[in-house]
Amino acid sequence: MSRGTVLLTGGTGFIGSHTCVELLECGYDVVLVDSLVNSSMRVMERITELTARRPAFHSIDLRDEEALDSMFRRHDFDAVVHLAGYKAVGESVEIPLEYYDNNIGGTVTLIRVMRRHNVCRLVFSSSCSIYGKAECMPLDENAAAGPTNPYSRTKWMIEQILSDVCTAEPDWSVTSLRYFNPVGAHESGLLGEVPRGVPNNLMPYVMQVVVGRLPHVNVFGDDYDTVDGTGVRDYIHVVDVAVGHRQALERIHHGSGHTVYNLGTGVGTSVLELIGAAEKACEASIPFEVVGRRSGDVDALVADVTKAQRDLGWDPRRDIDDMCRDSWRFQRRNACGYEE
């Protein structure tokens, strides 16, 4: 018996594909929407192989209101999990207007179409990057916002929009998940992170160095106020993130308004520490070079996840060694990504 029909935007992406598997395995019917700008249709084959279920799929840019409205008329949605959006910090500094247009414009269009079809339950993919340069660690949900780049500002602005919608329309129930740094892959080796072009995130970059697709890892700065001078982040396994989405979805029908949760492990890992853990998982030496800092980067971001543990019953189960091991398994089996 179905637990309901969920629209999953960005559904063929890294986090979206894992969330889709989690929802399907837990009895939900899932409809995927993705523009395929940074993902592959071959993900659908992998999802089907893992779950023995093939979700409906629509290739739509969320800013296309007519196409989105037509898709809503074809399905009876109980809720939406919204993951679609551009996500590279460095790129957002270079092309800020495209990030504001895509991330905020797509979300506003989605909300407008949801309202038209009386769908008012939403789980939003937010980001820890909205905290910016925090004064103390770990960060709880009450920490002041201070986004330092266009990507993180789009996430913060969208949260404000969602909060305003919930205030104006009390029937709405929205959960924003501020997750920290998702890495890892499905333990089967069938799903993982496959960026287009040169990876913007550290873990897939490291893995591509191991298989020889890139010459070395660029370490952006070694003069941060951290244990070894390199940036510290709270890395979280993508499967734990997927579980968090499912648990947020289960709770969202029990209240109204806008609620925010951190998803992380509460453990900070520096760039050099991650490289060391990856060397252990891959049983190989990983060359790296220290280069200049990137604009918008901060020293450290580590989560306090007490609220998610208390309210959602959510608890991260996988550590950095699990993340590196699963990332390596996926990379080893998919040396050229899904297009191999």
Image: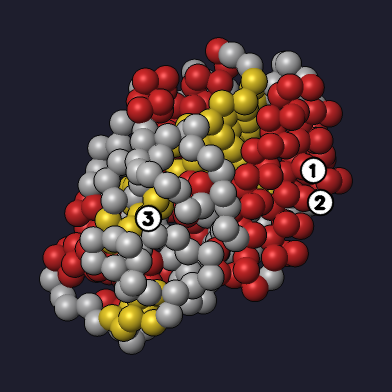
In the rendered image, residue 140, in percent from the top left (x then y), is placed at 42, 34
Above or below residue 160? Residue 302 is below
Mark number for residue 109?
Answer: 1
In the rendered image, residue 216, in percent from the top left (x then y), is placed at 32, 83
Q: Is 214 on the left or on the right of 319, as rendered?
A: right
Which one is in front, 99 or 34?
99
Instruction: State which tag comes first along the sequence, 1 or 2.
Output: 2
Above or below residue 314? Residue 218 is below
Instruction: State which tag comes first along the sequence, 3 or 2.
Output: 2
Q: Nearer the viewer, mark 1 or mark 3?
A: 3
Question: Seen from this angle, which residue lies furthest front?
Answer: 135
Which amino acid lies under the numbered mark 1 shown in the image of this protein?
Answer: Thr
Specify the quadrant of the image occupied by residue 169.
top right
Cα separation, mark 1 vs mark 2, equals: 8 Å
Instruction: State the residue at coordinates (56%, 26%).
Output: 259
Q: Residues within 10 Å of mark 1 (few under 14, many from 20)?
A: some
Specify the quadrant of the image occupied by residue 262.
top left
Which amino acid lies under the numbered mark 3 shown in the image of this protein?
Answer: Ala
Q: Is residue 47 visible?
A: no
Question: Seen from this angle, which residue lies furthest right?
Answer: 66
Cα separation, mark 1 vs mark 3, equals: 34 Å
Per the image, the residue denoted by label 2 is 64
Mark number for residue 300?
Answer: 3
Q: Is 267 on the left or on the right of 334, as rendered?
A: left
